[in-house]
Image (cartoon, rainbow, N blue to C red):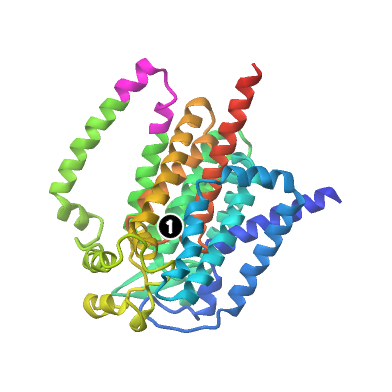
Amino acid sequence: MRKILIFAEYAFTVLALFIYTGAILTLILSGGALQHDHTEYDGSFNRIIFSSIYIVTYLLLILRWKKTLYILSKGISFYPIFIMAALSIIWSAEPSTTLKNSFTLINSSVFGMYFASRYSLKQQIHLLAWTFGIVIVSSFIFAIALPKYGIQSDLGSTTWRGVFTHKNGLGGRMVISSIVFFILGYENKRHRWRWLFWTGFSLSILLLLLSGSASSLLILFTIMLAFFLFQVWRWPYEFMIPTLVTIATVSQILYFLLSNGADVVFAAIGKDATLTGRTQLWPLVMDMIWKRPWFGYGYGGFWQGWNGESAYIWLNVGFPANHAHNGYLTICLDLGFFGLALFFLGFWRSYLQGLTWVRLSKTAFDIWPLLYMTYIILASLTESALLESNSFNWIMYVAVCLSVKMTNEIKRKSYSIY
């Protein structure tokens, strides 16, 4: 009976992770609508699904209430931004939206807390592998058997989007999938199922290429370099410091060369210098940020189409933007520079703890939190899914930050014994 309950909990976790990735549900409910299609659909089914996840998550946390209290004590760095998001209803341009979004932000973050408290880093990686394995298989099925849903044909190009509403959704998820399967393959060199891990890695790369998401491909390349850079961080100081200095010097030279040949680089990866209109959008967003610089328009209160402050941007940018295409600008719109400062204070604290943990540990699994936090920082340069409710990016960010805090605490206690 106990094994059945454990299996059921694992199945729930994988299913919840799959839903949080944004796979299938919205794509099906929207009838396979393309990005430029303004399709309205009944979101009640989505709300029922997410509410069910919230309820089960709270029940599981209550069953392990002692561990829940412990993990709550480690999440102090997250609380200020949660509190600010909830309190922003006071000054929000759209109080009802702020109330709904802050409620879902807190509840979806609780799943991240559950994931960190229930599973070790190794278990988290394996559960993510199951999740992305399902995403990969489903994406191939949708693209081949249901091209209306799995293929994106707009803006003069045809690319794969798999089980997501946009090709960038598939590209972004395949970056994380590639990292997960790479870690498993790298760490399990002699495992009998290692071929399965490398197959997952290869298929993730294939889907990433089929999505045509150049930014995701660039991010993956950077993350893979970061993985080996974090390995250098474990070396003895007499080898580590000269190596890091050399890498930093080479990086500066490459940055100088790339920044001076930006047009050539963009052309080589099939992108225009405006980043598909983002550089035209961002100055307009900054104009609106400076109107409410410190506390913003309330969490989720800005983008209300023609009925809100976003009408200024719609009028001037030439297309109906629904987000800033930049996670940091989105936080500034929602919670101002004060909210952005709160986010970075929590982020850098967790990142430094992650560096400390990597230095003390030996396995590839222990590098996962740093890799994911690096991914979040890079992905947020062109996408808005940072401080977003019911967002896979956010719940995994919460999970890896709390995992780092817990593992560091365990390590300190083990040192104190000796």
The location of residue 84, given as percent across then percent down, is: 47, 59
The location of residue 353, given as percent across then percent down, is: 48, 35
Q: Quadrant of the C terminus?
A: top right
Between 232 and 329, the residue placed more toward the observer is 329
Q: How many marks?
A: 1
The location of residue 56, given as percent across then percent down, is: 71, 61
Magenta-span inclusion, residue 318: no
> Which of the 4 quarters of the picture holds residue 242?
top left
254 displayed left or right of 356 = left
| Residue drawn at 53 percent across, 27 percent down | 362
Outermost residue, right side: 1
Between 210 and 288, the residue placed more toward the observer is 288
**What kind of secondary structure does the magenta stretch mostly adopt?**
helix
Question: Which stretch is magenta?
Answer: 229-243
| Residue drawn at 53 percent across, 61 percent down | 21
Between 309 and 34, the residue placed more toward the observer is 309
Q: Is residue 6 above or below residue 327?
A: above
| Residue drawn at 18 percent across, 46 percent down | 258
| Residue drawn at 54 percent across, 38 percent down | 404
Q: Is disc 1 surrounded by few (<14), some (14 to 19) or many (20+) residues within 10 Å?
A: many
The residue to which callout 1 is attached is: 386
User: Would residue 198 be seen by someone viewing this image from the given angle?
Assistant: no
Q: Is residue 296 above or below residue 194?
A: below
259 displayed left or right of 188 = left
Label 1: state its secondary structure.
Answer: loop
The location of residue 178, given as percent across then percent down, is: 47, 48
User: Would residue 297 be seen by someone viewing this image from the given angle?
Assistant: yes
> Which of the 4 quarters of the picture holds residue 318?
bottom left
> Which of the 4 quarters of the picture holds residue 209?
bottom left
The amino acid type found where label 1 is placed reads: Leu
Outermost residue, left side: 260
